[in-house]
Image (tube, rainbow, N blue to C red):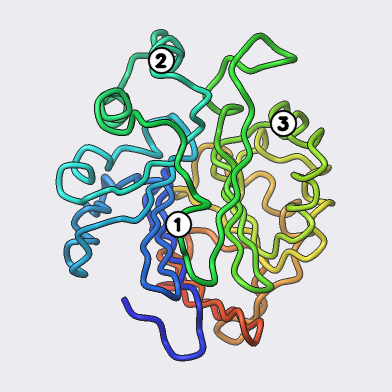
Amino acid sequence: MSLTKGFCMYLEIFDVERGACALITTSNGKHVMIDCGHNSTTGWKPSTELIARGIWSLDQLIVSNYDEDHVSGFPDLVELINIKVLARNASVSTAVLRTLKSEDGMDRGIAYLCHYIDNVFNGGPPGLANNDYGDTSFTFFRNTPGIPPFGFDDENNLSLVTFVTCGAHRFIFPGDMEKAGWRALLQNPLFRVYLNGVTNFVASHHGRENGYLEDVMTLCPHIQAVIISDEKMGFQSQEIVDQYRNHARGFWINGGERRVLTTRRDGYMQFDVSAVTGMCLVTLSTVSA
């Protein structure tokens, strides 16, 4: 996909049921994917989507959470697409990750991820300062493993929180961060500064109550929309939509105001961002019950 004149970043959020998958196209033609879940109902996979567009290389893959729904498409993706940089919470070693997964078992996507971290992406954290993403920048925050309250022993609170900034717009992708993890991150003054600039908030843990912390939301006074990636009517992701709605100013879409966008209702979403005019246009693939 090439950028329309006047726009500096395309952000696409795909409908992968309860999982997560987003693709960013920058002003200088770079492609960055955040998570690589797939849709088991439709058969949609990130690898086939990229190949259909003639994209055979990702400049960066960001893994926000070490659960299967965030990486279920990784085996096909890594076999078919050249991934130049893998960004993740690198404080979590594969030994720690395997221990975390020992209770419930390790599914195929996580197993592939561990293998490739050990054998391919083993050069340490990515050198983002050496990568040019045009008008778009990426900033990461994370907690570290350990014994609470000084560390975390669960995958969700070890999520990698990603801020994507283009001009006046900033998107936050917090993975499956839960309340305790949010509170730990709030101790970092720089994290609070980045929250203040958020204009679009991807809800943590697919909109579940345990991913919502009012203290975080009140530090984001400029939110236009909250985005929830989830499947139809399940996993308690509908219970706190009203709380999220109260924190957003809203977009004018299809003749009406929308403050909360969900993949279960709206399907595929595209955000076209201009770093020059400050404009952000939103396109939704469908509006259904």
> Which mark is on residue 249?
none
Q: Is residue 289 visible?
A: no
Q: Which residue is mark 2?
A: 101
Give the CA separation, mark 2 to mark 1.
33 Å
Q: Amino acid at mark 3?
A: Lys
Q: Position of residue 76 (x, y in %)?
A: 18, 43
Q: Which residue is mark 1?
A: 131
Q: Position of residue 279 (x, y in %)?
A: 62, 83
Residue placed at 56% from the left, 60% from the top?
Answer: 137
Instruction: Determine the image quadrant of residue 29.
Output: bottom left
Where disc 1 sits, the SS reads loop
Q: Is residue 182 above or below residue 252?
A: above
- Indicate which label's residue lies in the foreground, 1 or 3: 1
Q: Which residue is mark 3?
A: 179
Quadrant where the N terminus is found in the figure: bottom left
Residue placed at 34% from the left, 28% from the top?
Answer: 122
Mark 3 vs 2, N-terminal side: 2
Q: Check disc 2: other Cα within 10 Å, few if <14, some if 14-19, many if 20+.
A: some
Give the CA separation, mark 3 to mark 2.
21 Å
Q: Position of residue 253 (x, y in %)?
A: 58, 81
Q: Is residue 123 left or right of residue 147?
A: left
Q: Is residue 24 above or below residue 214?
A: below
Q: Is residue 212 left or right of residue 128?
A: right
- Between residues 287 and 215, which one lies in front from this camera angle? 215
Q: Amino acid at mark 1?
A: Asn
Q: Is residue 41 above or below residue 68?
A: below
Q: Is residue 143 visible?
A: yes
Mark 2 vs 1, N-terminal side: 2
Q: Is residue 85 left or right of residue 131?
A: left
- Between residues 141 and 211, which one lies in front from this camera angle? 141
